[in-house]
């Protein structure tokens, strides 16, 4: 079943498509033939701005988990041979501190429908039974509905088209590298559990530990690498979606850097 063909979702997509094309028409006097691409950039920025509260919630949750990391590690060492007790103690600690291992997850999931609808505008060839006019527009002569991989397979890739695709894909990869370097440098070294703890904490405790701040350092290091996956995805998706991905990862990097300054992670204790 095509989820996007479900009448309420199709109607929502159709309305969003009409608004996007209307915005492109408004921008045409200022941006010329790149009006559709400019509309994609502007809409993406507006959506990301509307989701700033989600980013703040995640930054606060990340800060809280990092603050509890040493105490969670101590609980793991203390109750390594009693997984059920460990899980209870960890949940009690989160409760006493007014947070949870799932803090920040619900807002992140709540944004998924919004992001899904916007992203669908940039990849679906048809919307609500009619052609997606956005993908017929061009950027520097390259159709927004074409992809680098598809153009290579079809034999339609031109030097100008390659330059456009390469600029977007390499820019996404560059943002990924900057993200990896910035957050690798900023991530605090949370105390690690002992080898005995690692061997003894199984079952429910292992599940709880996977949600603890001990896993956030690794998550920080993986963040930049995931941006490289985004660059690979941009090779295969339409150019319109590639523009969306570039603006999204660039916004995300800037927002995370700013929020990290507002909600800094606790520095590791040299002792």
Image (cartoon, rainbow, N blue to C red):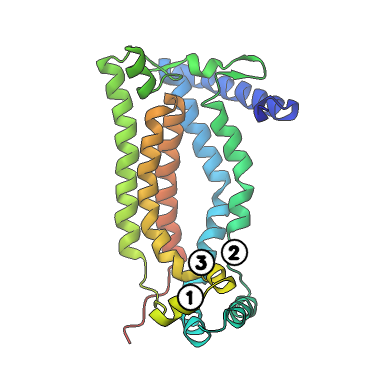
What crowding class fits label 1: few (fewer than 14 Cα within 10 Å), some (14-19), or many (20 or more)? some
Pinpoint residue 248: horizontal percent, then vertical percent: 45, 41
- Give the SS element for disc 3: helix
- Give the SS element for disc 1: helix
Farthest residue in the left direction?
159
Residue under the point 30% across and 50% down: 178
Marks 1/2: CA–CA distance: 13 Å
**Depth order, front residue of 153/40:** 153
User: Mark number for residue 103?
Assistant: 2
Check whether the beta carbons of the residues at disc 1 and disc 2 lie within 8 A of each other: no
Residue under the point 59% across and 71% down: 204
Check whether the beta carbons of the residues at disc 3 and disc 2 lie within 8 A of each other: no
Reading the image, the residue beneath label 1 is 67
What crowding class fits label 3: few (fewer than 14 Cα within 10 Å), some (14-19), or many (20 or more)? few
User: From the viewer's perspective, is residue 115 above or below residue 8?
Assistant: below
User: Mark number for residue 161?
Assistant: none
Pinpoint residue 37: horizontal percent, then vertical percent: 44, 24
* Relative side of 32 to 207, left or right: left
- Give the SS element for disc 2: loop
Reading the image, the residue beneath label 3 is 210
Marked residue nearer the N-terminal end (1 or 3): 1
Residue under the point 56% across and 20% down: 21
User: From the viewer's perspective, is residue 231 above or below residue 106?
Assistant: above
User: From the viewer's perspective, is residue 236 above or below residue 126?
Assistant: below
Report whether residue 214 is seen. Answer: yes
């Amino acid at each position: 079943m095509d989820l996007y063909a479900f009448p309420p979702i199709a109607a929502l997509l159709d309305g969003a498509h009409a608004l996007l094309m209307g915005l492109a028409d408004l921008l045409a006097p200022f941006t010329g033939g790149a009006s559709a691409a400019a509309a994609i950039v502007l809409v993406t920025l507006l959506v990301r701005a509307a989701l700033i509260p989600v980013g703040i919630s995640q930054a606060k949750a990340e800060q809280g988990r990092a603050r509890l990391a040493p105490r969670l590690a101590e609980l793991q060492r203390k109750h390594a041979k009693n997984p059920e007790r460990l899980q209870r103690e960890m949940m009690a600690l989160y409760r006493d501190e007014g947070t949870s291992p799932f803090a920040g997850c619900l807002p992140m999931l709540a944004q998924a429908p919004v992001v899904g609808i916007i992203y669908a505008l940039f990849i679906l060839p048809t919307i609500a039974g009619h052609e997606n006019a956005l993908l017929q527009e061009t950027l520097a002569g390259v159709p927004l509905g074409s992809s680098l991989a598809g153009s290579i397979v079809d034999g339609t890739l031109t030097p100008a088209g390659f330059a456009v695709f390469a600029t977007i894909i390499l820019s996404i990869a560059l943002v990924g590298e900057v993200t990896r370097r910035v957050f690798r440098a900023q991530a605090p070294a949370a105390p690690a559990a002992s080898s005995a703890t690692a061997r003894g904490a199984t079952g429910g405790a292992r599940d709880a530990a996977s949600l603890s701040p001990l896993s956030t350092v690794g998550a920080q290091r993986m963040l930049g690498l995931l941006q490289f996956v985004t660059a690979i995805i941009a090779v295969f998706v339409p150019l319109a979606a590639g523009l969306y991905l570039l603006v999204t990862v660039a916004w995300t990097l800037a927002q995370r850097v700013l929020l990290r300054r507002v909600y800094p992670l606790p520095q590791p204790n040299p002792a």
